[in-house]
Each structure stands twice: as C-alpha cells, then as structure tokens.
Image (cartoon, grey):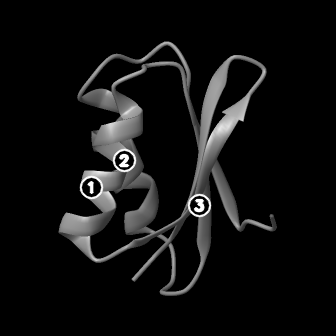
Amino acid sequence: MNFDKEFDASGLACPLPIVKTKKSLSDMASGQVLRVVATDPGSVCDMAAFAEQTGNTLLEQGSEGGKFVFFLRKA
C-alpha cells in the first residue's frame, strides 16, 4: 500500500505507540496515509480504538517480520 509518511514505534510500550502516532498524524494533511510499525502486541487493539475515537481510518493492519504494521488515513 502507498503511504505518505512512516513512523517506527518498534520497542515502544503502551501508550507510547499511540501517543507518537497521534503526533505523527498532526502534521499531515487530511487524506494522507501514515504507515506505523510497532512491536507492542497491545498496539493491535489500541490502534483500532484510536482510529475509531479520532475519526481517522484504519485502512489495513497486519504483521511483517514479527512486527505489527498499520496504515492509517488522516481524517
């Protein structure tokens, strides 16, 4: 999937992946896509909840090389 910006949250524990994802999205334009890579298993549930609460769209989530990968479209 194409993306405009990437944030690597590898090694960060809850709640830092979400906090830093929010910061990464803040300087992006509406409609742009952020790719987030995380190692915290809790980020799977957290990212879905974050997207729902903020109005951003969780386009896709999966795993890649033992890490969790998320694609979020900014609202």
Position in image of residue 61 (x %, y %) = 58, 49
Secondary element at tag 1: helix
Q: Position of residue 3 (x, y in %)?
A: 73, 65
**What amino acid type is highlighted by mark number 1?**
Phe
Of badges 2 and 3, nearer the viewer stands: 2
Q: Quadrant of residue 51?
A: bottom left
Whole-percent x, y for residue 53 in the image: 18, 66
Position of residue 71 measured from the top left corner of the image (x, y, whole percent): 60, 58
Which element is circle 3 on? Answer: strand
The residue carrying mark 2 is: 47
Amino acid at pointer 3: Leu
Residue count near mark 3 (Cα–Cα under 10 Å), binned few <14, some 14–19, many ≥20: many
Residue positioned 33% across, 16% down in the render: 13
Q: Which mark is residue 34?
A: 3
Q: Find out whether the residues at labels 1 and 2 contact each other: C-beta distance under 8 Å.
A: yes
Query: Disc 3 or 1, which lies upstream in sequence?
Result: 3
Q: How many marks?
A: 3
Q: Is residue 55 left or right of residue 36?
A: left
Q: Which residue is mark 1?
A: 50
Q: Residue at x 78, y 20 (%)?
A: 65
